[in-house]
């Protein structure tokens, strides 16, 4: 153990940058890459991560201070300098509501004494999947509802710059990949001719159709959509600085007009933003997920910083269109959260896309030069010299927006990292103010946000509703898809749970063989004592669609007989779930004889 100072790294030449958040305090135990402070320049906010793990002895800075490269942030009693975090940092795979790190004390609400321009039963701050679902559900309960959304369209990150546009592009990439595979069956097409403008237009049309639909549904429910930047100014008031802007995520222009809205209940659904790394310079060749979705060009090669789902999905699209990929990941494997046997199948099928996969490796410097982006790495698989790339995709995670909405004026407690803690009714520490979606914690997924939104809305209407989902599925919509839910083998081991598992290899599925995807498999995980299903995973095409059956089985407390005796249609990939259950029972007649259980 030694005392070391953690300092501000290279922040792209910015000097005297404002510290807008300090995420740790003396006594905290920090891991490598935990956020220490958040800085704000005139162009961006950026999180400064820890370069060493240990116990914080002294924090040398506070919110409002200014700091430059080399400035000391804190002193830590280190557990060994700059270690790459090991498996214990892997997220538990049954990703029920992960409690956000240490809550901040509840602030005293500000006294608002002005007049309100309008009054509502429920005001929803943020029009993403969580926000619009909550607003529509509250309106369906007969309440008078408004959504405050700063951008021109509803749908939030998911519809505008997340789930939907990424899947629109992935669909096209998958078709190209499928067609290429047909050559082995005697059906040969020429290599596709890419009109990138038309592909972008297709993606934009998909988004436009859905966001347009939401706008119509808001009108049909008489939900007012107030376009502007909302900030709490009291425990019952939000002030909205009206905005006008074109595309989602384009710089916001405030019109100068303001509206004050009074509410009986509020639902905070202000989501999350891309996490910036402090040492990354501004350059059009360095993009985040939003930049990748803009699909401006197809670079010759691309480094993906972060081997999570978002980076790998976008990488799949670019690779199919012609980009060579490399990926760097600090953890000991890609797609953390999923069991390694599932990921292994994906990795084998995708080897051809990558020139290099660097796990247990950190990106420590990025330099934009005229002839390319030069990146320096440290760690197990780090090349000695800086490497040159045509483009770099930063996909290192997302940060919650809790500190950007004036929550303290409403008396709502926000954690150091910007999460808002809630109870099972989605209530914050202020009983008439709820919070949902990315802003309340992991996993940051649209389907979690929607369900939480419904719970909050029902409580606003006076019902007693609880968010008591047993499991929340995760899906990488890569090729093949990797889907998992509930307890994984990795999380069972970490928690000391006694499980039994049953795998059905798709090599024994007629449909998978016919479809040319017989390298996939379906896995079910059961509680060894009760025999009830508690988890499952699928790797293969449409795994994301099929995992819903396993989610339902877990919610219903099914055992292997319930699933295995349910007649699944033949020949389908979904049959593999029934057959995996038969494997658990020792009665699967589509595999060689098993020992009877
Ligand atoms: P958001 O969608 O972030 O919406 C919050 C809204 O609040 C935004 O529209 C924002 O403009 C608005 N807002 C914030 N502050 C204010 C303010 N002060 N005033 C007014 N408005 C404000 N999830 C999945 O489940 N499946 C996927 O396949 C998937 N793919 C993804 C792909 C990408 C590339 C990305 C980036 C994300 C993906 N996600 C996916 C995650 C998903 O998009 C989020 O989990 C989801 O959008 C969260 O919903 P939300 O309602 O909590 O917040």
Image (spheres, grey):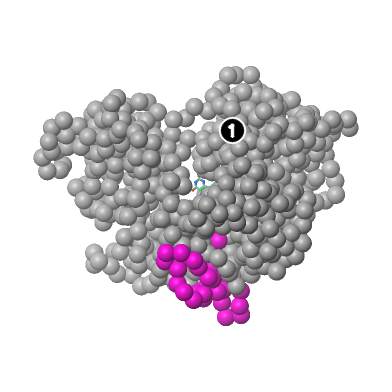
Residue at disc 1, secondary structure: helix
- Residue at figure coordinates x 52%, y 58% from the top left: 81
Question: Which residue is under mark 1?
Answer: 453
In what quadrant of the picture does the C terminus appear?
top left
- Residue at figure coordinates x 23%, y 43% from the top left: 504
- The location of residue 103, given as percent across then percent down, is 63, 36
Does the magenta run of residues contain 383?
yes
Say if 230 sits above or below 369 in the image: above
- Residue at figure coordinates x 26%, y 54% from the top left: 519
Q: Residue furthest left?
A: 593
Relative to 437, is 62 on the left or the right?
A: right
Q: Residues within 10 Å of mark 1 (few under 14, many from 20)?
A: many
Mark yes or no: residue 572 visible: yes
Total number of numbered discs in the rendering? 1
Say if 58 sits above or below 187 in the image: above
Which residue is more in the foreground, 133 or 594? 594
- The location of residue 404, given as percent across then percent down, is 72, 45
Q: Residue furthest front?
A: 2
Mark yes or no: residue 300 visible: no
Relative to 583, is 24 on the left or the right?
A: right
Relative to 289, is 492 on the left or the right?
A: left
* Magenta span: 368-395
Does the magenta run of residues contain 280?
no
- Residue at figure coordinates x 12%, y 43% from the top left: 592
Mark 1, ligand 1, within 8 Å: the answer is yes
């Amino acid at each position: 153990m030694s005392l070391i100072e953690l300092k501000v790294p290279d922040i792209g030449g910015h000097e005297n940058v404002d510290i807008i958040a300090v995420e740790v305090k003396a006594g905290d135990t920090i891991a490598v890459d935990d956020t220490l402070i958040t800085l704000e320049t005139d162009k961006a906010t950026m999180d400064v991560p820890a370069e060493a793990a240990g116990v914080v002895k002294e924090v040398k800075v506070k919110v409002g201070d200014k700091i430059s490269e080399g400035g000391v942030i804190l002193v830590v009693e280190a557990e060994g300098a700059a270690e790459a975090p090991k498996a214990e940092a892997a997220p538990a795979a049954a990703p029920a509501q992960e409690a956000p790190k240490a809550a901040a004390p509840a602030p005293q609400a500000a006294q608002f004494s002005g007049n309100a321009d309008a009054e509502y039963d429920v005001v929803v701050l943020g029009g993403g999947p969580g926000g619009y679902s909550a607003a529509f559900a509250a309106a369906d309960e007969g309440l008078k509802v408004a959504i405050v959304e700063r951008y021109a369209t509803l749908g939030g990150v998911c519809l505008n710059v997340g789930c939907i546009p990424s899947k629109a592009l992935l669909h096209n990439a998958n078709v190209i990949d499928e067609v290429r595979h047909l050559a082995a069956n005697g059906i040969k097409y020429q290599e596709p001719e890419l009109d990138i403008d038309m592909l972008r237009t297709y993606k934009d049309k998909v988004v436009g159709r859905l966001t347009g639909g939401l706008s119509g549904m808001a009108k049909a429910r008489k939900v007012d959509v107030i376009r502007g930047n909302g900030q709490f100014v009291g425990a019952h008031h939000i002030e909205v600085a009206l905005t006008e802007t074109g595309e989602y995520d384009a710089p916001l222009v405030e019109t100068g007009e303001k509206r004050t809205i009074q509410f009986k209940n509020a639902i905070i659904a202000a989501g999350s933003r891309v996490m910036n790394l402090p040492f990354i310079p501004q350059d059009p060749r360095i993009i985040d997920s939003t930049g990748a979705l803009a699909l401006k060009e197809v670079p010759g090669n691309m480094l993906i910083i972060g081997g999570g789902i978002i980076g790998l999905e976008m990488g799949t699209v670019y690779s199919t269109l012609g980009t060579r990929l490399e990926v760097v990941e600090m953890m000991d494997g890609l797609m953390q959260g999923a069991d390694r046997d599932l990921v292994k199948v994906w990795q084998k099928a995708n080897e051809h896309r990558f020139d290099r996969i660097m796990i247990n490796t950190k990106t420590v410097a990025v330099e934009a030069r005229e002839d390319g982006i030069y990146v320096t790495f440290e760690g197990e698989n780090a090349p000695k010299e800086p490497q040159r790339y045509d483009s770099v995709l930063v996909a290192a995670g997302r940060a919650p927006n809790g500190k950007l909405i004036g929550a303290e004026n409403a008396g709502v407690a926000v954690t150091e990292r910007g999460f808002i803690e809630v109870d099972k009714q989605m209530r914050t520490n202020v009983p008439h103010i709820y919070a949902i979606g990315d802003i309340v914690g992991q996993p940051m997924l649209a389907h979690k946000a929607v369900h939480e939104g419904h719970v909050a809305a029902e409580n606003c209407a006076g019902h007693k509703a609880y968010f008591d989902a047993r499991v929340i599925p995760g899906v990488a919509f890569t090729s093949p898809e990797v889907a998992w839910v509930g307890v994984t083998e990795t999380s069972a081991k970490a928690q000391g749970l006694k499980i039994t598992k049953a795998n059905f290899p798709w090599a024994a599925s007629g449909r998978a063989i016919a479809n040319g995807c017989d390298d996939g498999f379906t896995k079910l995980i059961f509680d060894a004592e009760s025999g009830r299903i508690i988890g499952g995973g699928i790797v293969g095409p449409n795994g994301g669609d099929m995992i819903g059956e396993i989610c339902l089985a877990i919610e219903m407390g099914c055992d292997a007989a319930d699933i295995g005796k349910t007649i699944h249609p033949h020949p389908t990939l979904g049959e593999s779930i029934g057959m995996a259950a038969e494997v658990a029972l020792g009665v699967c007649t589509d595999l060689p004889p098993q020992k009877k259980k």
